[in-house]
Amino acid sequence: MTGHRTTQILLPIIILWIAASLFSATVWAGSELPRLLDTIKSSEKYTGSASPDSAFPGSTFPSIIFPSTIFPGADKLGAVTSKPVVSPAYKEGKQIGFVFLTSDYVNTTGYSGKPLHQLIAIDMQGVIQKVLLVEHHEPIVLIGIPEKRITAVLDEYVGLDVGKLVRGTQDVKIDVVSGATVTVMVMDDNILRSSIKVARHFGLSGLQAEKKHTGPVASINPKINVIKDWQRLLNEGSVQRLNISVAQINQAFKDNGNLLALAFPEEGDANDIFVELYAAVVSIPSIGKSLLGANEYRNLQKKLKPGEQAIMLAGKGRFSFKGSGYVRGGIFDRFQVIQGDTSIRFHDRYHKRLRAIAAKGAPQLHDVDLFRTPADLKFNAAAPWKLELLVGRNIGPTKKVFLTFDLKYNPPKAYLNFSEVSVDKKRSTKAEPIWIKMWQLKTTEIVVLSIALLMLTLIFFFQDWLVKRPKLTERVRIGFLVFTLFGIGWYYNAQLSVVNILAMFNALVSGFDWAYFLMEPLIFILWASVAASLLFWGRGAYCGWLCPFGALQELLNKMAKAIKIKQVVVPWAVHERVWSFKYLIFLLLFGLSLYSLEWAERLAEVEPFKTAIILKFMREWPYVIFALVVLVPGLFIERFYCRYLCPLGAALAIPGKMRMFSWLKRYKECGSPCQRCSNECMVQAIHPEGDINVNECLYCLHCQVVYSDDQACPVMVQKRLKKERRAAHSASLESENRSAIKIELEKDK
């Protein structure tokens, strides 16, 4: 009755929760500009003082606003147009400019992982009249920086002529706020690039609207796979170089005209290297194989999703192009890649650190890093681009002055194809779905994984035969765990995560598309197998056999036992309470994902899978330390993380209650009086009463080995002894009968 009453209480709450997330997904879809302008009241109807309440969370707007608050001198803002998304501004019936949001034109993701919405007013001459911060989720206040210092930066853009900016005759210098570099640089980039796009579209300040490309179209030639040494790559322009000496960096700050910067020169020999930076597009086959080597290039091809490209950056010197900001915020804030009006700031999830450059004759460089370009930014590897390096110099306790240096890259024509694209043919040709190409690309991996899943299925279906052979069972299990760790995990990177579940649910409430989930074939196959196995064996099929991190824990524990490390048995009273922690962690992540999937994904770092499996411990030290802290208890308490902390295991255990079959056999004597299986279960999934807790069972089959062993299981021992006694009694009777017959035969003689 208590459980039924709890369900009655929780069900309406869950329904309201889902409804709220659906409403949120609907409200926030599309441009924010119409919703913002709906809050504006005309000056004729304005009768009170401005309210301090904000119209948007994280907004600097009052709840009642004049049109002139947004566009100085305007008395009316027109209806929002769709292409492009702008609102015309009027004064006395005459159009004087446009109002638009930066987030409608460029990628505006900031330090928080959420978009920064900035409102820009630009007049008909292409001059910016106003910039306002509409909404943000940046943790500025949390680190002690007043928001007004951030918004004050926006006033520096007033009077900027976008046309002159493009032509290089005018520039804007911003005062970067120490501690909020990423936020300010993101805002700067958003303002400039979105303003340029709007100005070009409407032909403001002499800028011309972008024309569609005519003539030959460049694309990467995948057939060229020539391996070249370092010097040849440099000579042909496949690798571009930016070199700045100590003398050059000091001269650059001197030319900038900031007197305070001159008081803090870079010390040392004038010819010393300040920064030496190399860049190359390694998704071009010949360049990639030359610089990365065959194995790393193959790994890259498996990692690249449709629409993604890869760039290798390498450098040395006093100044690191990576910096340390990405460790705290996950964003590399010292450089960005610019192609046309698109800028790319890289997040750590698109980054991989390399040990060295594979090309023959390549120098030993301190930093060698691989970056993938997000597919939605449509980076064209066959087109020119530039890297903008941001160099800062301290001019006070909390102030810095910044300069930018450009490294330009133009892919060598030798690696490109040039072709005319027929418009009619393009319209008539139906593009093949991207996910089909991904499955074709990973055919070998799909076959290997499918064979492994078939083998595991056979193990489970014929478990009664297998468990009667303890040594074979142990060898099969260890072999499969080794394949899971090294094959599925470290080689294929097919580690499932609770993030997959959160993303699936988020897709269900905001617009489900099978194509998105089919783009990762191995992950999709694993999830399909998990869904099927939950009906047969519960969570144990995945958690016990197919989880790479679980395999890592178990193999480490076996090594610990081999070197006689003493194992800790958790008291049952403690164990059955602590295992609930993983369910609480999952519910916390799930609830948070309904509010913010991005924050839930960040907190999902409680799973060390990304560090230990995907990145193979090649990550920033705090993450590596956390992964090791999680693994160390597993040397003393088998599968420690699986037992008590894993949110993915908790998520799988919940639907695992629906399993239709019970294939783990038990005797009526199990638990009373026999406790052998309960004492030997590696995750203590067997209750003292003898029942197996399916939510916690990892299906290792050890209890079934004991169940069938007439040397280990007390019940089987009793049966064996009875058979032996009956056999001995029969043998004794037979011996007596033979003796009697022998005596009678002797008498007859």
Image (cartoon, rainbow, N blue to C red):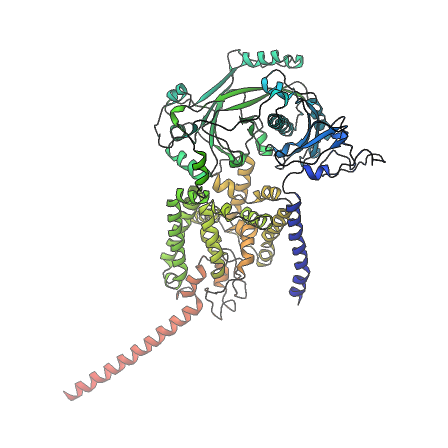
Residue 115's image quarter? top right
Q: Decide which of 161, 147 is in the foreground and name it.
A: 161
Q: In the displayed image of the protein, which residue is found farthest to the left?
A: 749
The total number of labels drawn is 0
Q: Where residue 67 sits: x, y (%)?
A: 76, 31
Q: Decide which of 695, 180 is in the foreground and name it.
A: 180
| Residue 39, placed above or below residue 592 | above
What residue lies at 68% left-to-right and 56% top-to-bottom? 13
Residue 642 in view (yes/no):
yes
Q: In the displayed image of the protein, which residue is found farthest to the bottom?
A: 748
Residue 146 in view (yes/no):
no
Horizontal arrangement in the rendering, residue 200 relative to residue 58 (left or right): left
What residue lies at 48% left-to-right and 36% top-to-bottom? 307
Q: Decide which of 697, 514 is in the foreground and name it.
A: 514
Q: Where residue 607 sits: x, y (%)?
A: 55, 45
What residue lies at 58% left-to-right and 54% top-to-bottom? 579
Q: Quadrant of the N terminus?
A: bottom right
Q: In the displayed image of the protein, which residue is found farthest to the right?
A: 47
Q: Quadrant of the C terminus?
A: bottom left
Horizontal arrangement in the rendering, residue 603 relative to residue 158 (left or right): left
Q: Where residue 576 sits: x, y (%)?
A: 58, 58
Q: Where residue 485 sits: x, y (%)?
A: 43, 46
